[in-house]
Amino acid sequence: MMDLLLTKNPIINSLHAKSINDYTSKYFETATQLNIATGFISNESIAELKRLVEYRKRSLNLSLFIGMNYIDGFTKLQYDAVKELGANLLANGIGNVYVSPKALFHGKMYSFLKGEQCLGAFVGSSNLGSFIGTSQNLIESDVFFEADYGMQVHNRIVEITNILGEPISQAKPIENFKEPTTALLDGFEYVRKLNSDEKAKCLLQASQNTIRIPLKTEEKSNLNAYFGAGKVKGRFSRRDYYEVEIIISTKLPNRSIFPVSDDGNFTVVTGDGYMFECACQGTNSKNFRSAHDLKILGRWIKGQMENCGALKLGEKVTEETLRKFGKTTMVLTQSVDKDFWILTLE
């Protein structure tokens, strides 16, 4: 069996196509082996693969071949994380991570096996972020192969990995890394990047009305919402590492001036010049989050922690993280015309 898959998106609903997740949601539960040959790997993908391995408790073997980053460049954060993932897989006898020192490989190929049977394999445009459900709102197209056809794809992944790949633990250590991006929200839907004049104009409109919100380090909420229960009870289900939701105390000083609007949304402008909507939801409007996409606020906060070396990829934000970061408070300052709020960290 073969099937052409498309990302679920309202614009193309009339095509009635299945998506990758229609298949993988069950494969993540039942497969005994997952084989990946991909080009680039994102921060979110590394974190989610780590979570998948931990969720399956050594019952899933993972072979991950990364075809682009070794030559094109890792950030140190990514490199340390994939090395740690490879070491963990090796130590537990459940797979390995491979890189390509010989050539650039930009394919996207995936196979799931259960014992000797191929449950399904995929080839197409979906990079790893799309495949495991952490990508932004892109429409991807892939071909699904089952049974014997799927096994042919699986065998090809193995051959490509054997020819081009080298275990990351054996590859020559990388000494020169890509600089981590400081443009943390570039490319995010629902986010506008202000030019320098627009940013300066907005920041000059700061009033005296300020709300200071402590950054909290609860194990499974606030900055660590990623580590809470999956979105589908009892199953491995999508969560985004950069997803956060800040809980606002009803006793917070200046709580009475907290942003309110008819739809619950309000505009923020960050000190580095991003504009997006946030919302206060839940009982007493206590849940502060980025509207439309919970990753926006989390990427902006956690990305700064990662860039200064305070937070390792896929790990929890702790009090030690905040100490290294040197900032413990999210500050909202109302504009003089009350049209937006300026968001900074102190």
Image (cartoon, rainbow, N blue to C red):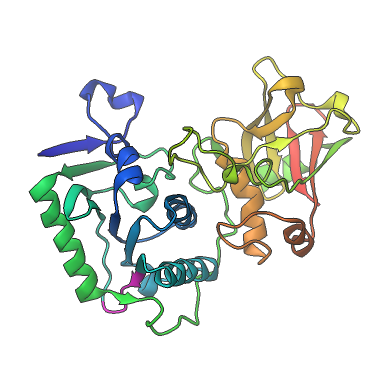
Q: For the point 40% across and 43% down, which residue is it?
A: 133
Left or right: 209 with respect to 177?
Answer: right
Question: In the image, is residue 195 part of the stretch drawn in magenta?
Answer: no
Along the line of sight, the residue nearer the viewer: 326 or 98: 98
Q: How many marks?
A: 0
Viewer-nearest residue: 224 or 104: 224
Q: Position of residue 75 (x, y in %)?
A: 51, 68
Q: Does residue 2 show up? A: yes
Residue 195 in sight in this render: no
Residue 340 figure quarter: top right
Stretch of the chain drawn in magenta = 97-102
Compared across the picture, whether 39 is left or right of 50 comes to left
Figure check: 34 above or below 344: below
User: Is 29 or 314 nearer to us in this picture?
Assistant: 29
The percent coordinates of residue 308 (x first, y second) are 67, 65
- Quarter of the image where one finds residue 101: bottom left
